[in-house]
Image: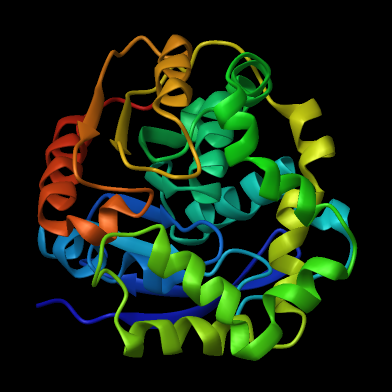
Amino acid sequence: MMNIDFEHIKTNGVELHVAVSGPEEGDLVILLHGFPEFWFSWRRQIRELAGAGYRVIAPDQRGYNKSDKPDGVRSYDIDTLRDDIIGLIHHFGHKAAAIIGHDWGGAVGWHLAATRPGLVRGFVAINMPHLAVLPKVMLTTPLQWLRSSYMLFFQTPKVPEKILSRNDYRYMEQALRTTSKKGTFTEEELGAYKIAWARPKTLTSMLNWYRAMPFSMKSVRKGNIEVPVKIIWGEGDQFLSTKLAEESLKFTDSNSVIWVEDATHWVHQEKPDFVNDQLIHFLDKTASRVIR
């Protein structure tokens, strides 16, 4: 089984803490976590993808865990987040990478694929829609508006930090427990998350991804995605409706969405064997794609 090493890599004006595994000569695969996680969310994918011959990196994205946490909301707009990942591709000496993103990591992946397709061999979105579909679906689907109401709460300064950190991050812990299949997150794993959340400036930096959304939405490109795309979607997602995945397919030539029954927003952690098989199949298909 492949080891996981860790590096601190300078990119786009920040230093990111990055988990690295797999043969150096392997095609580059970048795993992008979402809120409220860090590289650890890919613990069930890293070694398996590396064992399949890929060079796998999973950064703590800016604002998270051991990566830098610059001040200011504008430090977390979608263009800046994208450029962090472009810097990682260049750092590892590759012309392009396959991008796999969950939740907010998926938003960064969609944006990278839309705006810098020459750097992306293929893109897998796991329970994250193209950002451009959010306004339309929220307006036409009242249930999605209710599901997304927490995003409005996160816009409030300081108050969310006080509430989310109360009682040793009890609210955040319960959010992970109650929105996932029973047993998905062990006590030990939740303890690792709490350590990451408690690092100085982390909670505010994580929330700044949401607070930067008004700026990010102005940068979202609505044209077709030119690279191969796969969407993997846990149908029991309590945050994001399946309508968002269906609308996202309009931005790609592929109709390739995999609906996963009996899975939630955290599908890659609940059904890792199934998801890993799908990822490796997709990566093997796109590895030989000519990058222009």
Q: Position of residue 129 (x, y in %)?
A: 49, 31
Where is the C terminus found, in terms of image quarters?
Answer: top left
Whether residue 213 sits left or right of residue 48 in the image: it is right
Q: Work out whether residue 112 or residue 266 is closer to the camera in this orientation and state it.
A: 266
Residue plotted at (55% across, 40% down): 107
Q: Position of residue 90 (x, y in %)?
A: 52, 53
Using the rendered image of the protein, determine whether residue 25 is visible from the camera's viewpoint: no
Q: Position of residue 60 (x, y in %)?
A: 53, 70
104 w.r.t. 41: above or below: above
Q: Position of residue 121 (x, y in %)?
A: 35, 33
Q: Work out whether residue 210 or residue 146 is closer to the camera in this orientation and state it.
A: 146
Q: Work out whether residue 181 or residue 5 is closer to the camera in this orientation and state it.
A: 181
Quadrant in the picture for residue 270 = bottom left
Where is the N terminus found, in terms of image quarters?
Answer: bottom left
127 w.r.t. 178: above or below: above
Residue plotted at (43% across, 47% down): 101
Residue plotted at (25% across, 20% down): 256
**Structure colour scheme:** rainbow
Q: Work out whether residue 123 or residue 12 is closer to the camera in this orientation and state it.
A: 123
Whether residue 225 sits left or right of residue 132 in the image: it is left
